[in-house]
Image (cartoon, grey):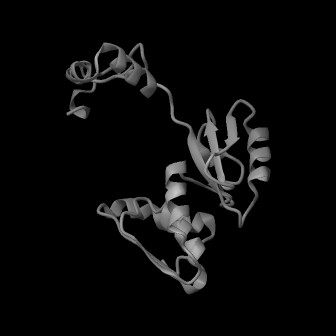
Amino acid sequence: RIAEQRPENPVSPGGVTVPNWLKDELRTSLGDERTDLWLGARAVLAPLGLRIRASRTTRAAFLAAARAARPDAEIQPGGVGSESVIVAKGGDPRTLPGYGEGHFVVQEEGAQVCAELIGVRAGEQILDACAGRGNKALFFLERVGPTGSVRALDLHPRKLEQLEAEADRLGISRENL
């Protein structure tokens, strides 16, 4: 319903355009002040999460190279582990140093935490039943190594089409995928 009612000119003063019926429902549910806060927060672009691949580079080396290449961007260590990086105002991540060499994966910190908490070990057989585009599945594949395997499934198979191309970019063998 929201997509059907998208205005021809999607720019609004707060940076977020929603149909009037949705604004009315939000105001009824949340009140004026909380609705304005919510809509205002939606106008702020979320930072981009990256997972640095320790097999290819270090987080310190990536941070130095990325900051040199993008001095106007905000590039900081993430808060969920030694491989996490947060990038704000950095533009297209495919243009960051190391992308073509597979030094990092675009992956928000919540997904990184989930993947780490599972504690995948070498030789295990893993089923990622809601794989989406497969970033966690590729993380698991790196962890299980050549003696393990990962099966990636998703309700929407088109999402998985990106998985093989991403494995190739990262230099991860698809033999056990």
Q: Is residue 160 above or below residue 18?
A: below
Compared to residue 8, the image places residue 151 above or below, namely: below
Residue 52 percent location from the top left of the image: 66, 56
Position of residue 103 relative to residue 86, above or below, is: below
Location of residue 86 (image quadrant): top right
Mark yes or no: residue 108 visible: no
Tally the numbered discs: 0
- In the displayed structure, 164 sits above or below 33; it is below
Identify the residue at horizontal 55%, vertical 66% (top origin): 139
Q: Quadrant of the N terminus?
A: top left
**Image-based side of 20 in relation to 97, left or right:** left
Q: Choose top left, top right, bottom left or bottom right for residue 57.
A: bottom right
Residue at 53%, 76% (x, y): give it: 174
Res 170 → quadrant: bottom right
Position of 128 with respect to 173 (left or right) is: left
In the image: residue 56, left or right of residue 10: right
Location of residue 79 in the rendering, given as x and y in whole percent from the top left corner: 63, 46
How far from the left and from the top, in percent, is residue 115? 52, 62
Say if residue 117 shows up in the picture: yes
Which residue is farthest bottom?
147
The residue positioned 75% from the left and 46% from the top of the image is 63
Who's the residue at 63% across and 69% down the image? Answer: 171
Residue 5: percent from left, percent from top: 22, 27
